[in-house]
Image: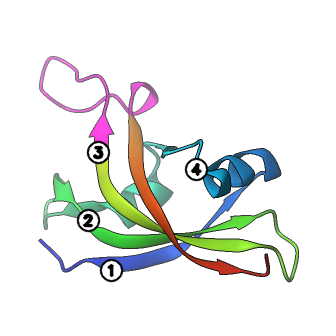
Amino acid sequence: MKAKKRASTLILTYHWFDEILSGRKTEEYREFKPFWIDRFCVVDESGEIIGLQKYDTLKFQRGYAKNAPQIVVEVKDIELSGEFDESGKIIPDESVFTIYLGKIIEKINI
């Protein structure tokens, strides 16, 4: 597995950003799509997913404004859950990444 790293910024709507900032929201979800597979999965030479990346933190941003508020949040774990077909391959439309969030490490523009 690759070493833990810090991911690029994840953009959130005001509501969900504020829920994480307040501590009420402790999980974030991302669809099982190529964009997130590339960031969250470890893939072998044949293109098969063999594991998940480990992250220490993720940065969340409230909207797209130039000086938008941001928070760096501890990542406890990332899981992939969903449905599988008869051959054991994951069904993309029935699957999701769950990011388990810990404490806020840093606040920017807040």
- CA separation, marks 1 and 3? 16 Å
**Residue 96, percent from left and from top:** 41, 37
* Residue at position x 69%, y 73% in the image: 70
Q: Quadrant of the C terminus?
A: bottom right
Of labels 2 and 4, earlier in sequence is 4
Of labels 2 and 1, earlier in sequence is 1
Q: In the image, is 88 to the left or to the right of 77?
A: left
Most extreme residue toward the top is 86
> Any mark on residue 5, and which?
1
Type of residue at label 4? Gly
Of labels 1 and 3, earlier in sequence is 1
- CA separation, marks 2 and 4? 24 Å
* Residue at position x 48%, y 69% in the image: 58
Q: Which residues are magenta?
A: 79-95
Residue labelled with disc 2: 53
Of labels 4 and 3, earlier in sequence is 4
